[in-house]
Image (tube, helix red, strand yellow):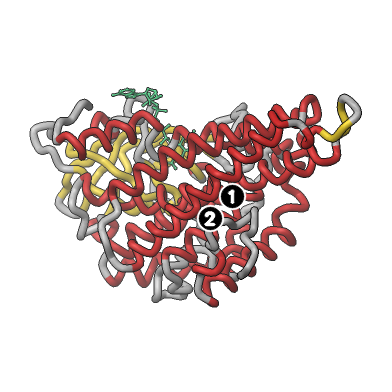
Amino acid sequence: MKQNNWFDPFYIQENLTEEETQIQKNVRDFCNKELRPNVVSNNLNNSFDKELYKLFGSIGLLGQTVNSHGGAGTNFVSYGLTAYEIEKIDSSYRSSISVQSSLVINPINSFGNSQQKDFFLPDLISGKKIGSFGLTESEAGSDPSSMQTTYKKLSNGYVLNGTKNWITNAPIADVFIIWAINENKNIKTVKGFILEKKFKGLETSYINNKSSLKISPTGQIILNQVNVPEENVLPNTDGWKSIFSCLNKARYGISWGVLGAASECWLIAKEYSENRIMFKKPLAANQLIQKKLANMQSEINIALSACLLTGRAIDENKDVINAISILKRNNCKKSIEIARNSRDMLGANGLLEEYHVIRHVMNLETVKTYEGTEDIHALILGKNQTNISSF
Ligand SMILES: Cc1cc2nc3c(=O)[nH]c(=O)nc-3n(C[C@H](O)[C@H](O)[C@H](O)COP(=O)(O)OP(=O)(O)OC[C@H]3O[C@@H](n4cnc5c(N)ncnc54)[C@H](O)[C@@H]3O)c2cc1C
């Protein structure tokens, strides 16, 4: 009988297809070669090289589940494994890929017409163009239905006004998916628009001084009387349902991704505690330390197993709406606990950038907040169980 492996107690690797294993290995090798060497200095300098998008595109990491317009056409398990490997390096890089894939390429592919797909998808999938997704506003975070960004119908298109805040890629994006409500508040429709950087009246700004997700550029999108031609409206959206379907794709990737960050922290803490001598013996010789390692191992592997089951269900075209909220909520919560405990186990060294753990702790604060906080996902789950909305 094969010996049970402490790193993979539920035989996840054996449950992957050859193609999934190969994709995971390719992404891991890419990350170690291209991303890992500069991650500490990039984080210290808030530095993101836009050219990275072309690199991501060149190995099929953008819109990877799309099987046209240059997309790799992989399944969702492979997309999850990709997020897991990339977030081992940094949540910023996983965010870059998630936003471009789930929140920009996906809505154009799902709700766009063939002209929009032919025009936008090849450049977004190759990384020649960078995308952003504008939903959140200063007064509309957890409750996007309070948004103030409006559209008004003109004879030949629309005019948009408003300000989106906390938008990943806003300062570097070429393409902007913008969600807006009808200027006439009696008409309760929300529409999606594809805007381009060159549109008159569209400006962006950086949010500076972020202590979290420092590599990822975040900012505002200011829309001042922006004229949007009819051909830039996403024609096949179904109101809020469409927005949530995009968010759920991103949340699925996040659920795998945070386990990559947690796994890095776990292994760093394990190695550190095996080598650090305190009270004349390795830290790892203490029961309290071993219990922490066992908790990390358990939470990561239970969560990974649930991610794999959910990915398989998505690949079988099943509705996973509750699974996604459970995973986003649980995995972010557990990953940040693991990162914080790892930081603690490294003592003062855990505060140094070169040990990587403190960066993951800080990053996971963002990942816990965006795409629905822990409590918002509890409310979604509560509503689905009881049929009573507490929002
Ligand atoms: C780095 C970063 C990148 C981001 N990128 C994007 C992006 O690309 N596109 C985009 O559209 N948005 C983006 N966001 C925004 C993100 O989605 C919002 O920050 C998130 O939805 C939370 O909204 P908020 O910050 O306004 O917090 P709030 O909604 O004000 O929530 C504050 C707190 O109140 C709690 N709360 C809220 N309502 C309730 C309630 N009814 N019951 C109990 N508790 C409640 C929340 O759980 C939270 O703890 C990003 C955010 C960050 C930090």
Do the CB atoms of the residues marked 2 and 1 lie less than 8 Å apart?
Answer: yes
| Left or right relative to 187: residue 368 | right
* Ligand 1 under 8 Å from disc 2 Cβ: no
The residue drawn where x is 23% and y is 57% is 230
> Which residue is more in the foreground, 131 or 44?
44
Q: Position of residue 281 (x, y in %)?
A: 87, 32
- Neighbourhood count class around disc 2 (C-alpha, 10 Å): few under 14, some 14–19, many 20 upward: many
* Total numbered badges shown on the rendered structure: 2
Q: Is 291 drawn above or below residue 86 in the view shown?
A: above
Query: Is disc 1 placed on a helix, strand or loop?
Result: helix
Q: Is residue 28 above or below residue 306?
A: below
**Left or right: 148 with respect to 352?**
left
For the C terminus, which image quadrant? top left
Mark 1 lies on residue: 260
What residue is drawn where x is 84% and y is 35%? Answer: 282
Residue type pointed to by label 1: Gly
